[in-house]
Image (spheres, rainbow, N blue to C red):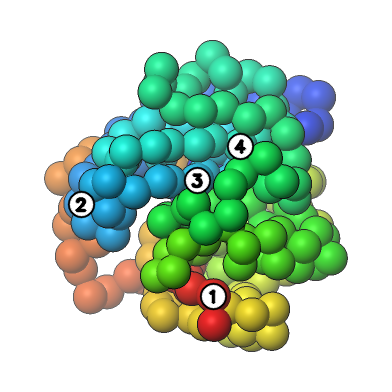
Amino acid sequence: MEAAQTIGVTGYHSTRFAPDPRRDVLWKTLVANYFQALIPANGCILELGAGYAHFINHVRAHRKIAIDLWEGLRAHVAPEVETMIQSVCDLSSIEPASIDFAFASNLVEHLTQPEFAALLQQLQQKLRPGGTLNLLQPNFRFAYREYFDDYTHVTVYSDRSLCDFLEAHGFRVIECRPRFLPLTVKSRWPVSPFLIQLYLLSPWKIMGKQMLLRCTPA
């Protein structure tokens, strides 16, 4: 399941990450059936590497902020979303202790470890008490064959190494799901709300190659 990414590479969004209406079906269903329950209605949401804004457009929140290097983000965000075209590694324009729910999908494998560490350091200051960082990522333990099919991947993480990295940089992991979702919408299986809901409810995640980690500043 490919999702939002922070990529400034010319042509990336017309080749590897071209528009696909199946992603909007996926994210609308995921928000309604999983993520919305984790988000306070009066809270502030930050999406890092928002891409086509499929996640943040469907979330209900008092304030929504989307960051991406890609200028094309502006054409896809809903009117109520604050848009920042910049690196996710610079959160200086966001008020301290203002974010309730930070989210990134398929992002940190595109960052070097020093960049990710710098981002985590800033998020410690930007998250409110009780606020969470939520990461959806390809899990190298299960997606090692496909991991470097994306030429912009620079860092390898499994559910185990990502938990360790987060805890080594001042976060406490509160939930880790090693097989949360399949890797991509580009498959022979139809992308339908019914099948997505069934998959979320199923205890068997045979095709699951994406992990979900939720954490909070320690």
Query: How far, Cα to Cα, is label 1 from label 4?
Result: 21 Å
State yes or no: discs 4 and 3 in contact (Cβ < 8 Å): yes
Q: Residues within 10 Å of mark 2 (few under 14, many from 20)?
A: some
Q: Earlier in the sequence, mark 3 or mark 2?
A: 2
Residue 189 seen anywhere in this rendered image of the structure: no
Q: Is residue 104 above or below residue 133?
A: above
Q: Which residue is mark 3?
A: 46
Find numbered disc 2 in the image and state the secondary structure of the residue it sits on.
Answer: helix
Q: Nearer the viewer, mark 1 or mark 2?
A: 1
Horizontal and vertical percent position of residue 123: 61, 61
Given the image, on which type of amino acid does mark 4 rest?
Answer: Ile
Classify residue 13 by image quadrant.
Answer: top right
Horizontal and vertical percent position of residue 110: 73, 52
Given the image, on which type of amino acid does mark 2 rest?
Answer: Asn
- Name the residue located 50 percent from the left edge and 37 percent from the top edge: 65
Q: Is residue 174 shown left or right of residue 32?
A: right
Q: Earlier in the sequence, mark 1 or mark 4?
A: 4
Residue 198 seen anywhere in this rendered image of the structure: yes
Residue 68 or 93: which is nearer the viewer? 93
Horizontal and vertical percent position of residue 1: 47, 48
State yes or no: discs 1 and 2 in contact (Cβ < 8 Å): no
Query: How far, Cα to Cα, is label 1 from label 2?
Result: 26 Å
Horizontal and vertical percent position of residue 131: 43, 64
Find numbered disc 3 in the image and state the secondary structure of the residue it sits on.
Answer: strand
**Label drawn at residue 33:** 2
**Label drawn at residue 67:** 4
Q: Which residue is mark 1?
A: 217
Q: Nearer the viewer, mark 1 or mark 4?
A: 1
Q: Is residue 32 above or below residue 120?
A: above
Query: How far, Cα to Cα, is label 2 from label 4?
Result: 24 Å
Q: Nearer the viewer, mark 3 or mark 2?
A: 3
Q: Earlier in the sequence, mark 1 or mark 2?
A: 2
